[in-house]
Image (tube, helix red, strand yellow):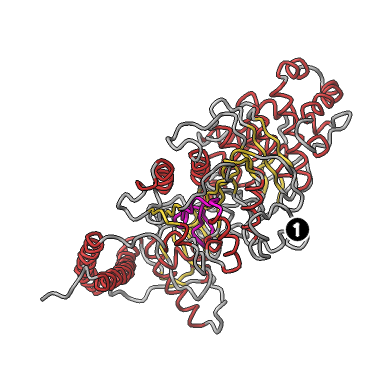
Amino acid sequence: MTNDATVTAADIARLAGVGRAAVSNWRRRHDDFPRPVGGTAVSPAFSLAEVEGWLRGQGKLTGSPVRERVWQTLRQTVAGDADLAGVLAFAGAFLLYLNGDPAGWRGLSGRPDKDVAVGLPGALREAAGPVPGLADAAALPRRLSGEQVVVVRTLAELADELGAAETFEFLRTRYLEHHSRRVYLTPEPVVRLMLDLGRSAHRPDGAEAEADAAVFDPACGTGSFLTAAHETSGDGTGLLLGEEIDDTTARMTAIRLALLGARAEIRPGDSLRADAFTGRTADLVVSNPPFNDRSWGYEELTGDPRWEYGLPPRMESELAWLQHGLAHTRPGGSVVMLMPPAVANRRSGRRIRSELLRRGTLRAVIGLPAGAVPNMAVALTVWILRRPAPGDHPADDVLMVDTSAEPDAFQDVALDAWRRYLRKPESVDDGTGRSVVVRIIDLLDDEVDLTPARYLPQGGAAESVGAFAAEWERLERKMAELPGVVSGLSALTEAQARDEAAMTTIGELAKGGVLEILRFGGKVVPPEGPVPVLTLDDVVEGRDATGSAAPGPDDVRVAAGDVVVPMAARHPVARVVRDGGALLGPGLALVRVDPARADPDFVAGWLRLGARDARLRSSTSTARFDVRRARLPRLTRGEQAELGAAFRRLADLEAGLRELQELGGTVVRLGLEGLGAGTLRPEG
């Protein structure tokens, strides 16, 4: 095992289970903290062995040093990202060998490095054989280099701890974190829902689908759908087919599934232009294909036999993917695809939508709530299609479901409506107004609009009246609360009279260790993932984090008591975070105060004043706000707390007024709807 691996501050934070700011504090406050051994002044590198020893001595070690050593060993074996992909392929080949022949490795691992270097390549080539292109990508020579021997011994140690499949999953996850801008991940709840919808098409009673049913994802990416299909297929014998345009991603998916013991065929390539599975069909096609792709192959694929329902318009790549999926579905099989909402009503696609309806192929359109797929500007929809089988009676209706009002239970709402529709269509209407069965003849008008919300009832009379009354009561309560906030602020500010104090800046306080200034470390917010992200709009609107991301090496995690401020002068706001855990998003700076020496609300108030002054001084809308230059008075901690409480009162008043405006808008809307429907009338 090598002890030469180095780690960054982000890696140290991961080992200790803390944010990067904590690592910065340790470096400043502990004289015995390990010194950098490389890197740059901005991004120093530390000896992993020294860091591990220090964390262990301080009782701060929570992560696995073996994992970190493996990852850093792999990273430092190569010079760039392309090489890193090759090393990951090499690691995959070794883990496949280790998984398939553990006794062979036990016999070889105890021998000298030179024997491993000569004896292992043949076994690796044999293990890599089932994964197309893996042997070439792993660059398997006739004799391993010294660095490659180090890599396999390091991998074997981690595999002893985690197992071969979990070891590769760890490496794959780290690789994806470093390439988050290139990789799109479908959220796990959406993956599970779409698989359940597809399987329920054959088993309406909710029983498990056949274990040997074939599942195909023509744009499989990192294999989310195929992996979940394997994990939920009973004995795991179902055949999995997948194609992915990125060679590295396809290879990682193939290795991942092979290590899980799945019967899978994963091919690299462009599914639409170079179909790797021509003539083959599956029981279920499930996918989250690329959206709005103008270069999907319109010119060269004009006469393609897959366009059974019509030639997809140049701007409608989604309709090409739908028909590609149907072409690979056996008669009676299902297609479940994630679609942007515009596919339901674009004029250019109405002919194909009409054909899908007339032939009884389209069975359901399900609207998801906003945020179900993070970092998408629109709420997406799930389309369910069934390839007609000989002798089928054409369907004469379609299920429409809108789960937008159920963001925490959209899977249950959608699946329940779909299963009830399959068993007994007339049972779909459960009185909630979330699902409805629409006759196909009613959809075949000039627009052929398949947007679910257009066909759902707008709520019953009692429901509308009840909603109006409830919102009106909330509005009255909020209006009654505001005078108390204002009077309390007035009494407080009169008691705040003070002499002029000497002024300082945020930058000077940072130099003195009173506070720390952090900024978003990446270039863009990564694609969706399990960690919430506090965005610029969240701070401006005064709301909780609405973004989502896969964690990355340069993340800044927000903690309770942090002050977050936009770096653009056009947004003169500053906000004290009350609940931590989210990642700091782009365009934001974070000021983390030492609560024993400074009051967060006091700092936030003066930062807001500084941002306002910067906006007034600026002649452009793109001017930056330099947080370090913001001025504030030198006051005692007690004086700061008094003034901070006043700033907090103003912030509470602002939040109350914002909520009052939202409530007022809701009451007006419900009142208009009630008067128009005749469910409300003027008193007297």
Q: To which residue does mark 1 refer?
A: 303
Give the magenta range. 359-382
User: Considering only vertical position in the picture, is 168 above or below 436?
Assistant: above
Q: Is residue 55 left or right of residue 40?
A: left
Report the front residue among 434 and 594: 434
- Residue type at mark 1 is Gly
* The C terminus sits in image quarter: bottom left
Q: Is residue 535 left or right of residue 175?
A: left
Point out residue 119 in the picture as x, y percentages from the top left corner. 84, 21
Q: Is residue 102 left or right of residue 499?
A: right
Name the residue located 66 percent from the left edge and 40 percent from the top edge.
281
User: Considering only vertical position in the picture, is 78 above or below 113?
Assistant: below
Secondary structure under tag 1 reads loop
Report the front residue among 211 and 121: 211
Point out residue 95 in the picture as x, y percentages from the top left corner. 71, 28
Assign the magenta stretch its main secondary structure.
loop
Report the front residue among 556 and 511: 556
User: Considering only vertical position in the picture, is 497 above or below 582?
Assistant: below
Query: Do we see residue 657 in this rendering?
Result: no
Report the front residue among 540 and 659: 659
The stretch drawn in magenta includes residue 360: yes
The stretch drawn in magenta includes residue 150: no
* The N terminus sits in image quarter: top right
Name the residue located 56 percent from the left edge and 29 percent from the top edge.
211
Point out residue 297 in the picture as x, y percentages from the top left corner. 74, 59
